[in-house]
Image (cartoon, rainbow, N blue to C red):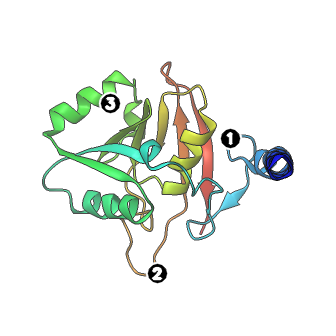
Amino acid sequence: MKKVWIKSLIAVTIAGILGSTYWYFIVLPENPTFSTKTQTVANSVSPTTDLAPSVLNITVYRTPTCGCCKGWVEHLKENGFQITDMVKPDSEIKTIRQKYNLPSDLTSCHTSEITGYLVEGHVPTADIKGLITQKPNIAGISVPGMPIGTPGMEMGDQKQSFDVLTFEKDGQTKVFNSYKF
């Protein structure tokens, strides 16, 4: 019995070392907040696909007339998110944006909250998962406007290049990830 326990401890230790090495040498150098690596939505696979379901609880605030918001909610569901879908008047959604000090030029058609961050617009799930895994000291991320080809804004083969931007409470923004088509 003692040998089995020791072998299990050794296996767990080795797995931990290998996992840490992977993150340090592979993921962090390619981390979108540290590099300008360009991706496409199709190749934006995140190593964080095995996050606990409780971490993927997201509240989406949208107006009742927005069809693309429903498409984005479906994109979230297909990627493992648990959705609280809140249909609200635009005035209430603006209040939520103000709470996070979202700059007006970063707004889109819907707003979401997850683990203390604001997620604005048609942000791909890989970027949301990256945000909640990395836990940067920011207020949130945004895809301003409604670029064609973003999740929920699919129009056949048409795609527009877009950036996922971070924003801080003081209004500073940076590129979190870029998608070029």
At x 63% / y 68%, what residue is drawn? 43
Question: Could you tell me which secondary element the residue under label 3 belongs to?
Answer: helix
Mark 2, residue position: 157
How far is mark 3 from mark 2, CA to CA? 32 Å
**Would residue 177 appear left or right of 60 to someone viewing this image?**
right
At x 49% / y 57%, what residue is drawn? 124
Mark 1, residue position: 33
> Which amino acid type is marked by label 2?
Asp
Image location (x, y in percent) of residue 136:
61, 31
Question: Could you tell me which secondary element the residue under label 2 belongs to?
Answer: loop
Which of the 4 quarters of the picture holds residue 34?
A: top right
Q: Quadrant of the C terminus?
A: bottom right
User: 1 or 124: nearer the eye?
Assistant: 1
Sooner in the amino-acid sequence: mark 1 or mark 2: 1
How far is mark 1 from mark 2, CA to CA? 28 Å
Mark 3, residue position: 97
